[in-house]
Amino acid sequence: MESVNVKKLLEAYFEGNTSLEEEKKLQDYFTNQTVADDLVQYQPIFAGLKAAKEERSSKAFTLPESKPKTIKTWWYSAAAILVMAFGAGSFYFSQPHYTQEEKEALAAFEKSKNAMLLLSENLNKGAEQLTFVKQFAITKDKIFE
């Protein structure tokens, strides 16, 4: 094979653009034939790839058997039911339960609170009017002095 073709194939190989057939040609060139002087630097790469391809492990591997996942799904279902029951129970027990007497007392409290707010508003309006009277008195005293 010409070194120009080999250089083109090497460039395509390092860019990842070669087919399996072209890679086999490169492998054969660098392992079986005499290599051009300017391409000798690539020979160890392909020799290492050939050696790695021929390596075989002598150790036997056994994969652990997996257990069925049905037990976990049962636990998830039970946990979801407990969470839902806890949420519903806490919502139910967080609501106040008043007797008739307590309800009447709350209604009376609301009425008295509204009456006090109305009284407060009217007193505030009266206090505003007093500031005008006070200003009038100050002005009157200045004029009659």
Image (spheres, grey):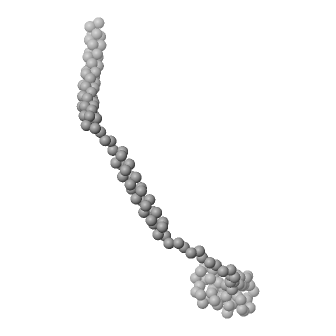
Which residue is located at x 49 percent, y 70 percent?
A: 69
Q: What residue is shown at x 68% (from left), y 83% (from top)?
A: 56
In which quadrant is the N terminus drawn? bottom right
Q: Position of residue 83 (x, y in %)?
A: 41, 55
Examine the rendering and report whether any part of residue 96 can be seen: yes
Quadrant housing residue 108: top left
Residue 141's quadrant in the figure? Answer: top left
Give how far across and how far down residue 65 sits, in percent: 56, 75
Name the residue: 59% across, 87% down. Answer: 20
Question: Could you say which is closer to the camera, residue 38 or residue 101?
Answer: 101
**Mark count:** 0
User: Which residue: 60% across, 90% down?
Assistant: 21
State whether residue 121 appears in this view: no
On screen, residue 57 above or below 117: below
The picture quadrant where one finds residue 8 is bottom right
Query: Relative to 1, is 111 on the left or the right?
Result: left
Between residue 105 and residue 12, name the one nearer to us: 105
Furthest residue to the top? 145
Up/down of 72 relative to 21, above or below: above
Q: Is 136 positioned to the left or the right of 2 in the image?
A: left
**Nearer to me, 81 or 137:** 81
Q: Position of residue 88 (x, y in %)?
A: 36, 52
Q: Position of residue 67 (x, y in %)?
A: 53, 72
Quadrant placement of the C terminus: top left
